[in-house]
Image: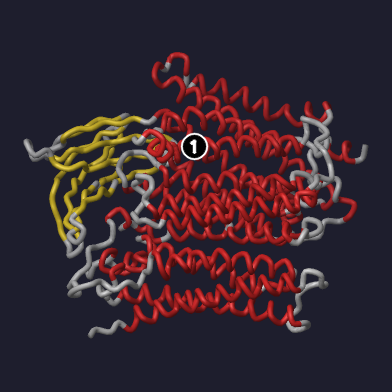
Amino acid sequence: MRTHPMPEFGSFALLLALALSTYTLVFGAIALWRSRSATGLTAGGDGAGRLGETARRAGLASFIALTCAAFALVWAAFTNDYSVSYILHHTNRDLSTAYKFSALWSGQEGSLLLWAWLLSAYGFVLRLRHKVDVRLSAYASTILAGVQVFFLLLLNFAAPPFAIQPGPVALDGFGLNPLLQYPEMVIHPPMLYLGYVGFSVPFAFALGALMMRYPGEKWIHITRRWTMVTWMFLTCGIFLGAHWAYSVLGWGGYWGWDPVENASLMPWLTGTAFLHSVMMQEKRGMMKTWNVWLIFSTFLLTILGTLLTRSGIVSSVHAFAQSSIGGWFYGFILVVFSVCLFTFFRQKDHLKSENRLESLVSRESSFLFNNLILLTACFTVLWGTLFPVLSEYVQGSKVTVGAPFYNRVNLPIGLFLLFLTGIGPLLAWRSTSLRSIRRNFVLPLIAMAVTFVVVIACGVRPWSAGDDMHAELFSLITFTLAAGVITAIGAEFLRGAGVVQTQTGKNLAASTVLLVRRNTRRYGGYIVHFGIVVMFIGIAGGAFNQSREQEMGFGDSMTMGAYRLVCQSFTQDSNPNYDTEYALLDVFKGSKKITQLAPERRFYHASQTSSTMVALRSTLAEDLYVIYEGKNPDTDKPIIKVFINPLMNWIWIGVLIVVMGTFLALVPNLTRVPAQARVAVPLPVGEAEVNHA
């Protein structure tokens, strides 16, 4: 009888993690119940405190157990242990090292293990930092343990990653999905899961704070950095996935409103709304109910996203697993929603707003409209994503919702959000005076008018664009609004820096740095907004995409825009993992050769499937995007498809700016703001008047 020590070790580690997490959940809840009338939990005071401390330590130990389980699965991949069914179906002997490591999340069982391990890592940090607020942290730790128990039940009973392959052990595996054999796929899924899983922490704190009727907004201060880091990871994960789709799938685009793409976008939308509306609660004691339900909804949408990705209930090029675990997720979503609903109605009197909206022309109203628009976008995406499932249930046949539906609804929403991004910082809290409006909006309006004229002069005329009218109209409005928003953000920096310059005598550059150091959260937020605007500019370039397809034998040429492509050769190559066909294309601009591109098509031995490797030449102005589509069997010539995608790099640059702004917003203020400067810097013009009226 064969023995499999590493898989057995991994299975034992998962069982141990389940036992430890169950202990944390059950005895943590008992400790909280016993201490509900006490002043709080301590590390070693009364019996409830000691019991709570053992629950906390069990939670810490569950991270170690899950780390052992994850290590065991990775070890099995690296040692080609095909006795493990998961390793047999997701790796092969000739797979490169990086992709063997990524096998951890390439299939259902491994990705669920990654989910559980990351959750235990977040919980480990939370439990180590429990002294920030011992009682609230105990609630959050217990709630996280409940989520952990669900995933560990899946891993132990519904989708075990260490299941032994019956029968003789294969000499080689079936290979990793070819679509996943791309460098970005080594980091895209972990980034996405860091975002998905990370929202469990603010969810746990919000639910715990509501259960214990936590006074004030301290729970928001505790979770602000958790939420921002999680949001940043999710943002990176989404756009790494978009860049992968652009570089690998070979269709010339980066976002197709695929169900799994939508699954990652929905919690991003509600998480973005939450990050904005918590400022209302911090500043004015408003929107408490909104905030609680926004974070509840965000967590539920991350669970739904995991379900869509890993259950196979929707058809998607991004969904790399099919299974019958959907029932487990439906049950868990129902339980979580029921707990949230029960707790809300039981404690809703604790969520009364301390102030009311005083004016539609105010910072509060811009946040409110921002929330409404983001939630409308989320509902639209949710409806379109689930419509095929609902239609099949009701009618017996799937009715697919395509990209035109999403674009028709969400492009106007995006433009309105871009508009709010510009005007929000220019409005004061409570109410904005007419004088302030005139003063703050002059420069942005001038910038918009000039940009509108320049763009039309450059040839963008939607009224004569025929079928492309809507796309060009979107681009014209986007460029116009972007100019206004960038001007508004720049004016905020210059206005504040001017005040600092007057106070300190430093030059403008040094004054700007000092201004940002005094309020990193605010000015980091402005940089994030600037990054979003840059991304919108890149998206607007899509209205001017061009494409052409042609057979290209030796010496044949193709003209596309300002480029001329000449086929120098087409050949084949092979290695132990895959065979490849590719063409060598010289690219000319005018009479000057600027580069050589080599688009290719690979055929993977283990999985007996093929994939495309796109050849790209990227500049700030445009991408030259070339695909090798295969050979025409009649002529034996390669079929080459070429796209020119304007402004594509602006999307990826915008993402980098967003990440930089988020990092800045996470940094504590390095310079204490002098008391006399707190009103003058960095309030918009007119806000000081209102606050002192």
Q: Extreme top residue here?
A: 464
Q: Extreme left residue here?
A: 634
Task: Residue 323: name its quadrant.
Answer: bottom left
Callout 1 amino acid: Trp
Q: Position of residue 137 (x, y in %)?
A: 69, 68
Residue that carries the numbered disc 1 in the rendered image: 383
Front-most of 600 and 389? 389
Q: Quadrant of the N terminus?
A: bottom left
Answer left or right for 621 relative to 673.
left
Q: Residue at x 64, y 56 (%)?
A: 664
- Answer yes or no: is residue 621 visible: no
Q: Position of residue 190 (x, y in %)?
A: 45, 61
Q: Position of residue 337 (x, y in %)?
A: 59, 52
Q: Residue at x 28, y 38 (%)?
A: 592
Q: Residue at x 63, y 77 (%)?
A: 55
Q: Is residue 145 above or below residue 427?
A: below
Q: Position of residue 186 (x, y in %)?
A: 39, 61
